Amino acid sequence: MASDILFEPLKFRNLVVKNRILRSSISGRFDNYDGSGTQTRINWEEKFARGGAGAIISSFVAVSVAGRHVPNYATIHRDEQIPFWRAVGEKVHEYDCKYILQLNHAGRQMDFKGVDNLEMPTLSSTGTTEPFSGFLCRAMTAAEIQSVIGQLAEAARRVREAGLDGIELHGANGYLITQFLSSGINNRKDEYGGSVANRARFLLEIIRAIRKEVGTDFHLQVKLNGIDYNNAVFFWKKKGNTIEDSIQICKLLEAEGVDAIHVSSGSSFPHPRNPRGGLPLDVIKRVYPIIDSGKKTFPNYVMARYSLLRPIIRLLWTRDQGEAIEGNNLQAAKAIKQNVSVPVLCTGGFQTAQVIRDAIESGMCDAVAIARGLIANNNLPELFAQGKPTDKPCTHCNRCLYHVLEDPLGCYDLSRYANNEKMLEAVMSVYQSGMPTN
Ligand SMILES: Cc1cc2nc3c(=O)[nH]c(=O)nc-3n(C[C@H](O)[C@H](O)[C@H](O)COP(=O)(O)O)c2cc1C
Ligand code: SF4
C-alpha cells in the first residue's frame, strides 16, 4: 500500500516530528496566578500526545509578567519554572510526541491585567490604543525594546534547559511582535518602523539574541500572519501587511536561520478570520472579562449583553470572514512556501484527512497545526491513521474560545454530546490524570 503523506516524518533542520499533524497553541487558565504551572496543564497536553499528534505547540507562554495577556497561564520568566516545563515535556515524550514552546509578549493586546501587572506600563510599538479592549499603551523606548529582547532570549535558554524540543515565536495575531511587523499598527518613525525591513528589525534582533542563548542547533520557528486583514472589523483602519510584505519578512527570517514558518492570519486575537467560525454572543455576555479594564470593554459588553444591539457586533464581525473555514490560510501558506525553502506549517480549520493530504501533496504546506479540531477530537491523528471519518467533527462554533476566559478549556458545543452532563464530564476530565482522550 502506498505510504500516507500524513504519517511521513516531518524533517526540520534540527528536529524530526513523526507525522504532519501538530497541535496548534491552545490552553486555558489552568495554572497558578504567579505563572507557576499545574498538573492540570500536564493532563491537558497529555490528551493530545496520547491522541497521536506529532508535536504539540504550547499555548502563549509569557516571558515576563508585564507581557502576560491574562493571569493563570504558566509563564517562563523565572529559572524556577524550568522543572515544571521539563515535567510537561517528559509526559508528552512518553508518547513519542515533540513539545515546542510558544514564547510571547502580549504588548498592548491583553484580555485583562492582574494585580501584579496592574501598575506596569502596557508596552507596544505604538502609543495608539488597541482597537478591541482599548488598553492604554505607549511606544517602547530603545532601552525597553532591548530589555524585552533580553527577556525573550532568557526564556529561550530556559526552554532548552527544560529539555523541550523547540521554540515558536508568536509573531501572529496581534501580540507584541505583530505590533512591530504590521504596517497597520506600527507607526514608528525610528529604525523599527516604516519599511518592511525596519518593521522586521525587532523580530530579527530577537532571533539573533535567542540564537546566542540556544545555539544554531535548536529548533526555532516563527508563527506569523500571511495577511493581516487589519481592517476586517474596523473598515476605516489601514489594512496592514499584505502577502507580499509577509513573503519579504519570511525571506529575512530564513536568512536569519529560522527553521520553519507557521502561517496564520489576523492582526488581532480573536479576529473574524481566526479562529474562523461562530461568534457565540451568549457565552461572551457571561464571561466578558472585567468590563472596565480597557477603554472599550464596557461598550463591547453592552453590545453583547443586549440582544437588540447584537446584530451590530455580528455585522462588524462577519462582514469580511472570507472563504471556507477548513484551510482558510492555505493560499497564503502556498505563496510563502513558494518563496522559502524551510518547512511551512499552516493553521486554520483543519480536521479532514483528505483536505490535509491534498494541501501537503499539492505543495501548499508541509504540515498543519490544528487547535479546535483536536479539542473536539483529541485522537484525530489516530482516526486518520485508521482511515475513519470523524463522527462528531468540530462545528467551529468558537464556544471553547470564549468560555476559556472564565471556565475550563474544552468543547462546549452541546450538539456534539448526548447531554449536558456528558459535555461537562469531558470538559472536567482535564483535572484527572490519565483520563481517556475525548
Ligand atoms: C481556545 C483557543 C486558544 C488559543 N490560544 C492560542 C495561543 O495561545 N497562541 C496562538 O498562537 N494561537 C492560539 N489559538 C489559535 C490556534 O492556535 C489556531 O491557530 C487557530 O484556532 C486556528 O486553528 P483551528 O481552526 O484549528 O482552531 C487559540 C485558539 C483557541 C480556539
Ligand atoms: S466548542 Fe467544540 S465544536 Fe465549538 S469550536 Fe470549540 S471544539 Fe469546536
Image (spheres, rainbow, N blue to C red):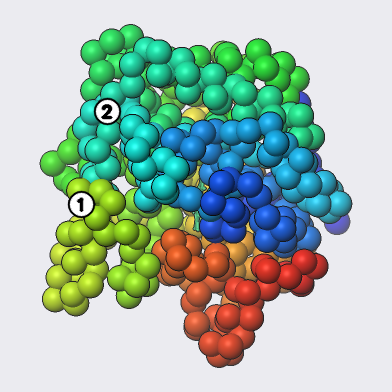
Tell me if mark 1 has few (under 14), some (14-19) or many (20+) residues whose alpha carbon lies within 10 angstroms of its own. Answer: some
Give coordinates of residue 205: x percent, y percent.
Answer: 50, 14
Q: Position of residue 136 (x, y in %)?
A: 24, 38
- Is residue 334 something that shows in the picture? no
Q: Is residue 320 above or below residue 429?
A: above
Q: Amino acid at mark 2?
A: Arg
Q: Mark 2 highlights which residue?
A: 138
Residue 282 position, x and y percent, is 32, 75
Residue under the point 72% across and 58% down: 39
Q: Position of residue 379 (x, y in %)?
A: 71, 65
Vertical placement of 237 versus 44: above or below? above
Residue 296 badge: 1
Q: Nearer the viewer, residue 432 or 418?
A: 432
Q: 383 or 106: nearer the eye?
A: 106
The C terminus lies in quadrant? bottom right
Identity of the residue drawn at 32% across and 25% down:
125
| Amino acid residing under circle 1 | Lys
